[in-house]
Amino acid sequence: MTAFTETDERRELRKAVAALAAKYGQEYFRTCAKEGRKTDELWQEAGKLGFIGVNLPEEFGGGGAGMYELSIVMEEIAAAGTGLLMLVVSPAICGNIIVRYGTDEQKQRWVPGLADGSYVMAFGITEPDAGSNSHNITTTARRDGSDWLLSGQKVFISGVDQADSVLIVARTEDSKTGKLKPALFVVPTDAPGFSRTMIDMELVNPEKQFQLFFDDVRLPADALIGDEDAGLAQLFAGLNPERIMAAATGVGMARYALGKAVDYVKDRTVWKAPIATHQAISHPLAQCKIDIELAKLMMQKAAVLYDSGDDWGAAEAANMAKYAAGEACVKTVDQAVHSLGGNGLTVEYGLASALGLARVTRIAPVSREMVLNFVAQASLGLPKSY
């Protein structure tokens, strides 16, 4: 099997997820956003069908597959005009990190719930003064007997109101050098000293963003995931899946917008012919199709590399996939709106709200500029500019 030919099982998974997503779709997603409620029905049904934890080990209630399969789930849901942002976070980032670095007891405690969606874990790395530069993280964890005390803050953390806990990237002091190094802690959202504030966003999206505050939050010793001396290695075990899932979101959203545009231009008739007969309409949409397919191929390559255990190869491909999908998504949504003219901005056609959401695919979880920095340095061997 290669990234170019999907197995029968993967085609069946794609078909099943598409059928589920079609039951809900863009109108459901928009209604949830406007009414201030979550996409709980879609999340719960996806969990019952085994889609949420398809990448997690069977021994912990997952599907025993990999990131390729989870990216299929994400892509098909987005292609229906809806979204499940916590798919990126809970099973992809947190689930992969815990499966790879957690103790047996930690896996037994958290992974089954992550797999069926009954337990949701958010992920917190970004800080007001430390976005892409993880070396500048100031949230710290210090020992207090056998416990840890966590202090600091995070910003733009997704879905904390849906989560039972948050996997927090903090820094601990190296006992030998005194220097601070990254470490990962599971923090219950109801822990004393943990508070949050919702960030008002100009997005039609039921999934919210939060600023988090930690005021000497006391955590037991087993809240630490993995080795406190492992540093960045275990952190990046979750960031490759994050980028793959971000790419899947962009590819799916672009497919949704392109489908809307194609249906419209084939039907909309001016001067006795559908406007699709004009190259000024058809060529830009054809370019969008090419861009989407190229981004999808790189996403599939990244997933195959990650699932095969090639972390470094996956890092390059995942970053490239995220970049390509973000560019394709923004371009396609914009072209779709333009192809529909005034109708592209109406509620009826369901494209206008995608303009803002499409921009997110360029910005998060890593900006296109930081991807270019990575490729320049890691792939081309060019010197750092910062």
Image: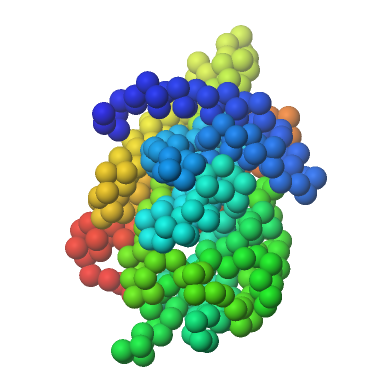
Image label count: 0
The residue under the point 23% across, 56% down is 379
Return the x and y of residue 169 as percentages of the image width and height: 48, 70
The residue under the point 58% across, 68% down is 187
**Quadrant where the image shows the N terminus:** top left
- Where on the picture, by quarter, is residue 213? bottom right
In this rendering, the answer to whether 303 lies above or below 228 is above
Left or right of 293 on screen, residue 82:
right
Q: Nearer the viewer, residue 101 or 138?
A: 101
Return the x and y of residue 318 as percentages of the image width and height: 35, 49
Return the x and y of residue 365 as percentages of the image width and height: 48, 57
Residue 359 in sight: no
In this rendering, the answer to whether 25 lies above or below 305 is above
Q: Nearer the viewer, residue 114 or 41?
A: 114
- Where on the picture, by quarter, is residue 380? bottom left
In this rendering, the answer to whether 88 lies above or below 352 is below
